[in-house]
Image (tube, rainbow, N blue to C red):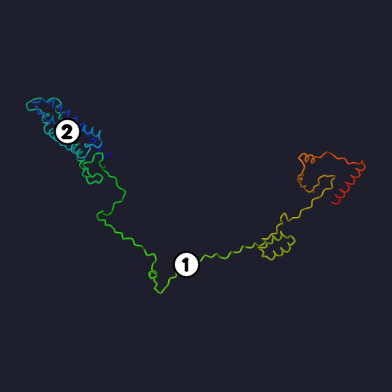
Amino acid sequence: MNFLVTLRYLVFAVFIVCNAILASVAVWNASLVSPRGRDTRIDTYLVVIGALGLALTFAIIFVELVRRNAFTSRIWFETLWTAIFFLLDLAGAATLTAVGPDDMCTPSKHGKALPPGSCVSSRVLIGFTWLCTLILLIYLVLLLLLTIINRNNDQVPRIWECTIYNFPPLTAPRSNAPALPFSKDKMTEVVTPPPQRPNTVPSALYSMRSIGLGSQYQIEHFRPPPHSSGPAIPAAIPVASPADYLHRAPSNAGTVQAAVALYPQFLSSAYVSQPPPAHMQPTRPVNRSPPPLGDWPRADAPLRIKRKAPPTMGAGAGQTDTAARPLGPRTRSGTSGHSAASTRLDLAPHAQRSRGE
């Protein structure tokens, strides 16, 4: 809230209290004194001032509640009613100070007794009249001072028409822009020269003079050399070490050892003879078992390769299954002696073949 608005509400509160006390005490003071003993026009004056002050204050509050920026909140109206009531209260306070104590606190020369409370009421009137006058004086001086200070303010071009609520604050916000070191009146306009098209192709004489050469010299401009790729570098041929010869040809081991002896000592120690790989080592013969009888499996029996029988052409599924299945043991025709002789003849070649192996 603005400082001036807060001060105005405070002045309204004190002004209402003072005017109410002045009006009530002035009526009480006028009733204590008989009309013949003292002039009561000063009490009537204070009652009228108090009533007018109360009526004006409540009227301003009511109008501003109905309308925000009414004419009662403008600076000129605020200054006017404050100055008028300041003068009225000043006149009443001066009159009471000059006349009141002598009439109400000093006994009369005719020996009449003063009514009780007359001196107290007179002193109350004098005190509150001066208090109201002093408050109005402070408020009026502060209002005029702020108005004079802000009379050249750009935010409020017509300061007297401004309302109390829109009055500029005491501390105006400072702008972030730095102040200019010189006034705006002394600023001179800088005339920019018209743009000119530059000469894209300078003359040869100008280019020679710029580097300190005469007209008899000719400048050869730089030209980048053509890009040419160099000859391809042949790949390195791997050189076999003497150890490879040992693995490849075991029979030449003596020759390689003699060749290694020709190398210096620190190189010949690096060539350590390594055993030949596993695929170069000779396989040990497998001990053959004695010839078995019949079809007994041997230790060095060759692997049998399972081959699928080719499908028969022109035969049905039922015929194929019937041909593949054995029909049981067959009996040879002839006598039993002929069968035993043929069995011995069949076993004899098999035994000779096993012994030969």
**Nearer the observer, 113 or 9:** 9
**Amino acid type for the residue under numbered disc 2:** Thr
- Where, by quadrant of the figure, is residue 200 drawn? bottom left
Residue 95 image offset from top left, x and y in percent: 12, 33
**Nearer the observer, 61 or 340:** 340
**Nearer the observer, 10 or 127:** 10
- Where, by quadrant of the figure, is residue 27 drawn? top left
The numbered disc on residue 223 is 1
Residue located 51% across and 66% down the image = 226
Residue located 76% across and 55% down the image = 282
- Which residue ends up furthest to the bottom in the rendered image? 216
Q: Earlier in the sequence, mark 2 or mark 1?
A: 2
**Amino acid type for the residue under numbered disc 1:** Arg
Residue 45 image offset from top left, x and y in percent: 13, 31
Q: Are marks 2 and 1 in contact (CB under 8 Å)?
A: no
> In the shown orientation, is residue 242 left or right of residue 352?
left
Q: Residues within 10 Å of mark 2 (few under 14, many from 20)?
A: many
Is disc 1 placed on a helix, strand or loop?
loop
Residue 273 image offset from top left, x and y in percent: 70, 59
- Where, by quadrant of the figure, is residue 89 drawn? top left
Q: Nearer the viewer, mark 2 or mark 1?
A: 1
> In the shown orientation, is residue 332 left or right of residue 159?
right
Q: Residues within 10 Å of mark 1 (few under 14, many from 20)?
A: few
The numbered disc on residue 129 is 2
Residue 344 image offset from top left, x and y in percent: 90, 45
